[in-house]
Amino acid sequence: MTWGISGMCGEIADQIDDQLSGLRSLGINRANLSKLSLSTGEKARSIDTLSDIELADLQSRLDANGVHCYCVTSPVAKYSVDTDARLVSQQLERSIIAANILQARYLRIFSFSVRDGSDTSTDRDQIHRAFAGIVTTIETLGTGVIPLLENNYRMYTADGPSTRDLLADYEPSRVALAFDAHACVVAGAKAFDEVWPEVEPWVRVLHLKDYVAETQTIVPVGHGDGQLSEIVAAADTSAVEDLALEPHLHNSKYGAGRNPLDLFRESRDAVLNMLDTTGQPRPPIGKP
């Protein structure tokens, strides 16, 4: 078994048909769905705000394009642990419904951040309880969808020890990790040297974007400080299932004024070149 490749297609365009045609042109048939519009001129909305009817329409469009929703990339828990529980519950339940209707393998979540003026030691237990509640709800209401934690520099999971501390409550089959090297760099940590050894057993997705700390610039994968060549070379392709492209180049200094799909293609090519250089297998790429 080897890994596949997916794309955060909201970075290609707002309208879902443009997102899916863009993925197809890149030979990618796994979609990570976050924000989208269903009609031209409509403002893109977070996937947790779509109605059941809109989600069914979305599934039809995915089927028509031969694209599978690999991950529902929700905003759940990307905020302080003292956020109104009603908001968390609403976002979570709608995200689970989306994952069920779209038959997603993963539901992306975050770890909460500490309260204003607090710290990780003070808020640790509250964060663990709140995160456990999210996991249990996904297991109860989801139809086989797996919680996928993404580490983030603004969240509790800003470094290796804290991320491992949260994940240690769960087997990797119960809660997986989308490892974001870019987030490690922004947090001032060395992604491979310091964070990877702490979290590697839970990594099922490599969340691929890169960052140059000195200039604070997002750059193509392998051109920054994210130690992604080392990470890719070390990854066990029998455990890591997916290379998730979320290049962020379209709203960076690097990509200013350029076509988002062209930037996405550049990121995909950078990843494929890195795989060749490190001796790792390329994922299956379909015909445009």
Image (tube, grey):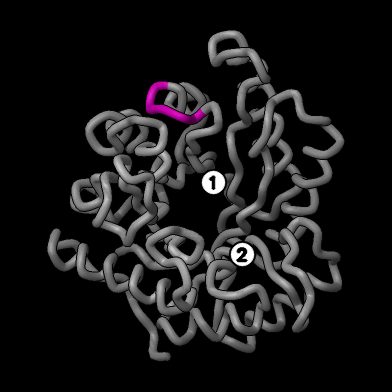
Please identify the residue farthest to the top as the structure is shown.
122
Residue 244 at what x, y percent from top left? 43, 60
Q: Which one is nearer the viewer's eye here, 151 or 57?
A: 151
Mark 1 is on which residue type? Leu
SS for tag 1? strand
Q: Is residue 255 visible?
A: yes
- In the drawing, does residue 270 fall left or right of residue 204? left
- In the drawing, does residue 163 fall left or right of residue 130? left
Mark 2 is on which residue type? Leu
Residue at 34%, 52% in the rendered image: 210
Residue 279 at what x, y percent from top left? 13, 62
Residue at 29%, 45% in the rendered image: 226
Q: Which one is nearer the viewer's eye here, 144 or 188?
A: 188
Residue 274 at what x, y percent from top left? 21, 63
- In the drawing, does residue 287 fall left or right of residue 225? right
Rate crowding at label 1 as few (under 14), some (14 to 19) or many (20 or more) other CA atoms within 10 Å: many
Rendered position, 119 above or below 71: above
Q: Which of the 4 image quadrants contains residue 143?
A: bottom right
Q: Residue 51 magenta-drawn? A: no
- Quarter of the figure that contains the N terminus: bottom left
Which region shows up in magenta? 157-161
Q: Which one is nearer the viewer's eye here, 241 or 153?
A: 153
| Of the image marks 2 and 1, the number of the one nearer the N terminus | 2
Q: Is residue 201 visible?
A: no
Q: Residue 159 magenta-drawn? A: yes
SS for tag 2? strand
Q: Which residue is mark 1?
A: 148
Q: Which residue is mark 2?
A: 33
Residue at 42%, 26% in the rendered image: 164
Circle number at residue 28: none
Residue at 59%, 39% in the rendered image: 110
Residue 139 at what x, y percent from top left? 68, 42
